[in-house]
Image (spheres, rainbow, N blue to C red):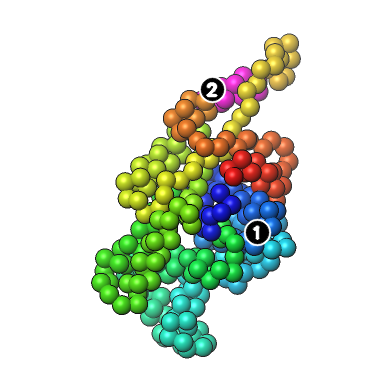
Amino acid sequence: MLDRRLVLVSGKGGVGKSAVAAGYALMAQRHGLRVLAIEMESGRGLSAHFGIPDLAFKPKEVRPGLYAMHMVRSEALLEYLSLQLRLPGMGRFGAVARAFDALATAAPAVREIVTIGKILWEVREDKWDVVVVDAPPTGQIASYLRAPTSISELVTTGRIRGQADWMADVLADPQMTQLLLVSLAEELPVSETRETLDWVNETGFVEPPLVLANRILDEFSEDVSQHPEVDEMATLHRSLHASQEHWLTELRPDLELPKLFGLFTPTEVAAHLSDLLEDLK
């Protein structure tokens, strides 16, 4: 796993994908790798788990050798135009920027190619040993993985076609890219994860992902029948554990991550997960 240059972490909303992404970034940093963690969605997913204020588009060092940034599509677009047109200070051209941003919002795959293109550019620049991405949920990730191929189908030749082709090649290369799908052992997350697995296997835009089951309960085997104050909680625990066992059989994850009881802060959760994710290596 630590040989991969790009690790995309997705999952149904609320399953803990941001915590897993932060934990993976911390694990890679602990192994001496130079890491860039990218938060693709709005919110404070990664920043909360790193214990820092809101992230910006410019990467910020949050640990020695670990940098983090928040994806801003308009900033990524201006950066791309500055690089491709070799025009410094592209941000000053407000009308041009707004026009391109409107195009990126309206045209099929353009918005996604700008975003995934920034991520893949960071991989290609070779500044980082690994780029870890807190990616969109499974309901949205397909449009980003499909974007390079969609652009290649629209543009038959030229620089843009060439760039789209190498993006697709990086995503499909099992030596470069790994997709991690995070799920809970519950009906809806398992169903959505399995649908995503079927789509990935059918399209081949990225190699088959690894599946992580999060917040898994240990079996409760103690006899607390003589303690009515906790007997009801024990009964609930056993019921939830039995339900999880059923859905784990359906999911067949590559790694199970425990439910972290207690007063854990988001930073502590990420630190715990960074240790547990060692088993992915």
Q: In terms of image quadrants, where is residue 111? A: bottom left
Label 1 secondary element: loop
Q: Tag count in the figure?
A: 2
Which label sits in the foreground, 2 or 1? 1
Looking at the image, which is closer to me, 32 or 227? 32
The reply to whether residue 202 is in sight is yes
Q: Residues within 10 Å of mark 1 (few under 14, many from 20)?
A: some
Label 2 or label 1, whichever comes before in sequence order: 1
Asked if the magenta segment contains residue 125, the reply would be no
Whether residue 221 is situated above or below residue 53 in the rendered picture? above
Q: Amino acid at mark 1?
A: Leu
| Image quadrant where one finds the C terminus | top right
Residue 233 position within the rendered picture, expressed as x and y whole percent measured from the top left: 65, 23
Residue 162 position within the rendered picture, expressed as x and y whole percent measured from the top left: 35, 72
Whether residue 133 is situated above or below residue 194 in the rendered picture? below
Q: Classify residue 114 as left or right of residue 261.
A: left
Q: Amino acid at mark 2?
A: Ala
Identify the residue at image location x=57%, y=65%. 70
Residue 231 position within the rendered picture, expressed as x and y whole percent measured from the top left: 68, 17
Asked if the magenta segment contains residue 241, the reply would be yes
Residue 173 position within the rendered picture, expressed as x and y whole percent measured from the top left: 43, 56
Identify the residue at image location x=62%, y=23%. 219
- Circle 1 is placed at which residue position? 33
Identify the residue at image location x=32%, y=72%. 161
Q: Residues within 10 Å of mark 2 (few under 14, many from 20)?
A: some
Query: Which contiguous range is marked in magenta?
Result: 232-243
Label 2 secondary element: helix
- Circle 2 is placed at which residue position? 242
